[in-house]
Amino acid sequence: MAIEINSDIVDTPPLPSATVMVLRDSASGPEVLMMRRHGQSSVLGGAHVFPGGKLDAADHVPDADALDQPLAQLQARLGERDLDAATAAALHVAALRETFEECGLLLGQSATPAQLAQLQALLRSGLPFVAALQQMGQRPATAALVPWSRWITPRVPSVTNKRFDTRFFVTLAPPGQDALHDNHEATETVWLNPRAGLQQYWDNRIDLAPPQIMSLCQLARFASVAELLAAAGRRPPPLVAPEPFDEGGQRVICYPGDPRHSLPAPAWPGPTRLIYRNRRFEPEGGLDAFF
């Protein structure tokens, strides 16, 4: 991915969206599902990303009984004072829908290959995700999602010309289901140990954008999926509002806790800034600074 640093101001409001970090245990610790975006994609073409996408109007559920948790509970889990309950629920639905559409995983549920194929057929017929599940006698498993963080793209995005207000979730991979890519939006599906993924990035074997870099840095601190999910459930998802600036001819993205950031309290342990050099974003101190 040849990153071209953007310096244009984007005045449009950030688009509400959802991203899911699907996790499984392995002999070397937790692994996270990542997908390589098609090289011709207009957003992060060629980069490895987590499943996710924009909130759709159809993600809003008119009947609260169609969900497995009350709207107020879904609102409380995101911990956003100004977010209404209906939109909080819709963001959970978007996370489940996007994960199924992009890699074929129906999170939080047991499903046979025939059931997964039936759901795909119902979606292709034009049914919204929740309505399709209802027709199959199921409800979206929002309880399978644990809020992890919230990322808001700044008015001067560094790697895209769009702004997003993205809620990141973590979840356990559903047993017995295989993650697949569609060869259209994504051309590769991989399970990566977060530390190994950052090493591959450092070795120029994969491309990552800053939100994925910083998220892998945090995931690498846990020895098991259960430990990670428990930690996520004990605290409200932190707001990660990157603030970019240019210094010495280099783009720098700083995060909460950095001396140049407007929020003095760190969102999490680890580096508080990334610097664009060597045609990639690096922390001060090199690879070891991630850990």
Image (cartoon, rainbow, N blue to C red):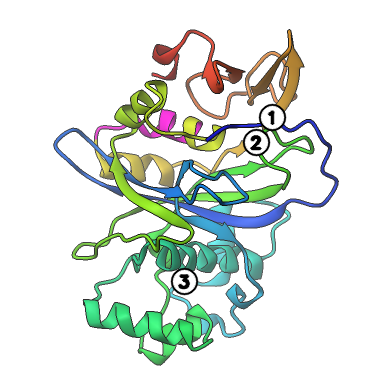
Region rendered in magenta: 214-223
Closer to the chain start, of discs 3 and 2, is 3
- Identify residue for label 2: 159
For the residue marked with disc 1, what is the amino acid? Ile
Nearest the camera: 12 or 232? 12
Residue occupying the point 75% across, 17% down: 246
Q: Is residue 216 magenta?
A: yes
Q: CA distance from mark 3 to mark 2?
A: 36 Å
Pinpoint residue 74: horizontal percent, then vertical percent. 54, 63
Nearest the camera: 66 or 6? 6
Q: Secondary structure at mark 2?
A: loop
Residue farthest to the front, as pictured: 40
Give the numbered dot on residue 181: none
Q: CA distance from mark 2 to mark 1?
A: 6 Å
Q: Secondary structure at mark 1?
A: loop
Residue 221 visible in image: no
Residue occupying the point 35% across, 67% down: 104
- Identify residue for label 3: 69
Asked if labels 1 and 2 touch by Cβ distance under 8 angstroms, the answer is yes
Q: Quadrant of the C terminus?
A: top left
Q: Is residue 193 magenta?
A: no
Q: Within 10 Å of the Cα at label 1, are there few (<14), some (14-19), or many (20+) other Cα atoms?
A: some
- Identify residue for label 1: 5
For the residue marked with disc 3, what is the amino acid? Gln
Q: Is residue 43 left or right of residue 141?
A: right
Q: Within 10 Å of the Cα at label 3, are there few (<14), some (14-19), or many (20+) other Cα atoms?
A: some
Where 126 sits versus 194, above or below? Answer: below
Residue occupying the point 57% across, 85% down: 63
Q: Secondary structure at mark 3?
A: loop
Nearest the camera: 159 or 152? 159
For the residue marked with disc 2, what is the amino acid? Val
Nearest the camera: 103 or 194? 103
